[in-house]
């Protein structure tokens, strides 16, 4: 036993001969060095330093302005996340008060273009990885003297001469507990300047700015562009597409190319008679003229071919790359490529579920918590005294109950959805309010009137059918799934 222990100590002493288990991916070799040379154990602020974030943001904005693929990605997020903006549902014992508050919010939000600001924020989260919405006082606004606008994320940063420390990180001021106090916002450029002067800035308190970003790394003070891992593929796809198009255009503009095989063609051959050189040399190209035939010199051989562009799989290749890039942003394949031809209905629904879940999470955890909730609470404080005068009582601003109802994409088959809603309402499987949540273009009052009218005609229709039906029996359509079958007749003809 002592010899074995001594041998073990000898191995430990040598060190380099020890065989240890571990993760192969954590080892460094000649093959893996170049691949992971940038992987280091650093803080999130060091992994995404401000100068890297700004550089990527400017490149991402360039692709967004010049690359239709990048525009499509950002527009998809903009329409699905924000759309026309959410509807407010105010909750209090006084139903008239609820409806009045909802109408006031709808009018002010339309006047202040809140939905436009939310769409800009959703697009900015893709391009810049974050969005800054500014609340400012505006006496020209009706109902509530506030304006709500989006500002350029590149305007927020450390002022000139101020270094990153515990209380200031990349333009964000913190207190001793880590709470955000405010932001350093560069002033708009003056005169003909096109860049921000970092020496001219304002401190804007946090309750005047709504900062929205997805925390992809713990302890991140700010977001970074969603296009960050896609910038190179976006540029390469654009180059590939342009090169294929240019090759096809060039080929389409050329009729043919002829190449000579012999360079001498005067008919003489011999030692005494020196052959006369023609204007054609081996390998020369012959230009073709419109509506003219090419006459080759005697004894020369001309070879011609049509330089047509060969058929490539450029479209399929580009579509596959776009689908991969869209996946990095959480988009489904059909949302990335804009093509649903390869789907059946079930596959399309399954592929869309992950994107719908991502949209709902962003709406609930970011836009509601970081934007809409504080915005509505500020709005309510403006109208609270007016509500007290008009209704005698109104919920205290610190005790509000409300919810946001986000718009949903249009139904693929509206008629089938309407039948399903009608059957569910008739059988007590849902309520009018739940149905309204899914159909934001329909008002509760409209649904109530519609149901009352439907009940009247159903009652009258039933009486008529009862009189005309065989045996005096009432005949009604039978509900099968989401379709209404034909009436079943028994005991004779109608």
Image (spheres, rainbow, N blue to C red):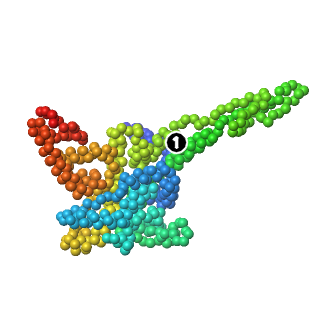
| Front-most of residues 228 and 378 | 378
Q: Using the rendered view, name the quadrant where residue 165 is placed.
A: bottom left
Compared to residue 443, the image places residue 348 above or below, namely above
Instruction: Name the residue: 68% across, 35% down.
Output: 257
Residue 453 relative to residue 57: left or right: left
Instruction: Name the residue: 18% across, 53% down.
Output: 452
Compared to residue 443, the image places residue 411 above or below, namely above
Residue 233, given in percent of the width and then of the height, sits at 50, 47
Name the secondary structure under disc 1. helix
Instruction: Name the residue: 39% across, 64% down.
Output: 133
Residue 70, given in percent of the width and then of the height, sits at 47, 51
Compared to residue 251, the image places residue 446 above or below, namely below
Question: Furthest residue to the right?
Answer: 272
Residue 175 relative to residue 272: left or right: left
**Dot 1 crowding, Cα within 10 Å, few <14, some 14–19, many 20+:** few
Q: Quadrant of the N terminus?
A: top left
Q: To which residue does mark 1 refer? A: 31
Residue 79, given in percent of the width and then of the height, sits at 38, 53
Q: Is residue 314 visible?
A: yes
Compared to residue 264, the image places residue 191 above or below, namely below
Instruction: Name the residue: 33% across, 66% down.
Output: 108
Q: Using the rendered view, name the quadrant where residue 100 is placed.
A: bottom left
Question: Furthest residue to the left?
Answer: 471
Q: Quadrant of the C terminus?
A: top left
Q: Using the rendered view, name the quadrant where residue 284 is placed.
A: top right
Q: Is residue 160 visible?
A: no
| Front-most of residues 69 and 10 | 69
Residue 198 relative to residue 341: left or right: right
Count up the numbered dots. Answer: 1
Residue 185, given in percent of the width and then of the height, sits at 45, 68
| Front-most of residues 310 and 327 | 310
């Amino acid at each position: 036993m002592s010899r074995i222990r001594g041998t073990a100590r000898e191995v430990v002493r040598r060190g380099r001969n020890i065989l240890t288990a571990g993760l192969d991916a954590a080892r460094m070799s000649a093959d893996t060095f170049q691949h992971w040379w940038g992987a280091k154990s650093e803080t999130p602020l060091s992994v995404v330093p401000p100068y890297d974030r700004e550089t990527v943001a400017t490149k991402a904005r360039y692709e967004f302005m010049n690359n239709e693929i990048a525009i499509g990605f950002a527009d998809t997020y903009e329409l699905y996340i924000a759309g026309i903006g959410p509807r407010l549902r105010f909750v209090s014992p006084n139903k008239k008060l609820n409806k009045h508050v909802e109408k006031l919010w709808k009018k002010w939000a339309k006047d202040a273009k809140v939905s436009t600001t939310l769409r800009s924020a959703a697009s900015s989260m893709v391009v810049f990885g974050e969005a800054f919405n500014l609340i400012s006082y505006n006496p020209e606004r009706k109902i509530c003297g506030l304006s709500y606008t989006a500002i350029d994320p590149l305007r927020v940063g450390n002022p000139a001469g101020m270094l990153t420390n515990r209380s200031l990180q990349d333009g964000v001021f913190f207190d001793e507990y880590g709470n955000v106090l405010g932001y350093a916002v560069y002033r708009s450029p003056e005169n003909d300047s096109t860049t921000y002067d970092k020496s001219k800035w304002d401190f804007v308190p946090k309750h005047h700015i709504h900062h929205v970003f997805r925390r992809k790394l713990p302890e991140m003070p700010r977001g970074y562009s969603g296009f960050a891992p896609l910038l190179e593929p976006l540029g390469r796809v654009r180059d590939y597409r342009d090169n294929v198009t240019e090759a096809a255009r060039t080929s389409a503009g050329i009729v043919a190319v002829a190449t000579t095989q012999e360079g001498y063609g005067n008919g003489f051959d011999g030692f005494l008679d020196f052959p006369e050189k023609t204007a054609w040399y081996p390998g020369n190209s012959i230009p073709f003229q419109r509506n003219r035939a090419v006459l080759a010199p005697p004894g020369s051989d001309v070879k011609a071919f049509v330089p047509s562009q060969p058929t490539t799989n450029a479209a399929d290749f580009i579509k596959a790359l776009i689908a991969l890039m869209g996946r990095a942003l959480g988009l489904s394949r059909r949302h990335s490529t804009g093509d649903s031809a390869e789907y059946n209905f079930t596959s399309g629904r399954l592929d869309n579920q992950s994107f719908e879940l991502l949209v709902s999470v962003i709406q609930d955890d970011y836009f509601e918590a970081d934007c809409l909730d504080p915005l509505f609470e500020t709005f309510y404080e403006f109208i609270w005294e007016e509500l007290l005068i008009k209704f005698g009582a109104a919920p205290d601003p610190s005790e509000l109950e409300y919810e946001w109802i986000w718009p949903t994409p249009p139904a693929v088959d509206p008629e089938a959805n309407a039948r399903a809603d009608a059957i569910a309402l008739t059988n007590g499987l849902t309520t009018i309010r739940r149905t309204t949540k899914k159909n934001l273009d329909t008002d509760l009052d409209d649904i109530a009137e519609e149901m009352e009218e439907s009940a009247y005609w159903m009652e009258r229709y039933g009486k008529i059918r009862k009189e005309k039906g065989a045996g005096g029996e009432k005949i009604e359509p039978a509900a099968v799934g989401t379709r209404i079958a034909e009436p079943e007749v028994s005991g004779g003809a109608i």
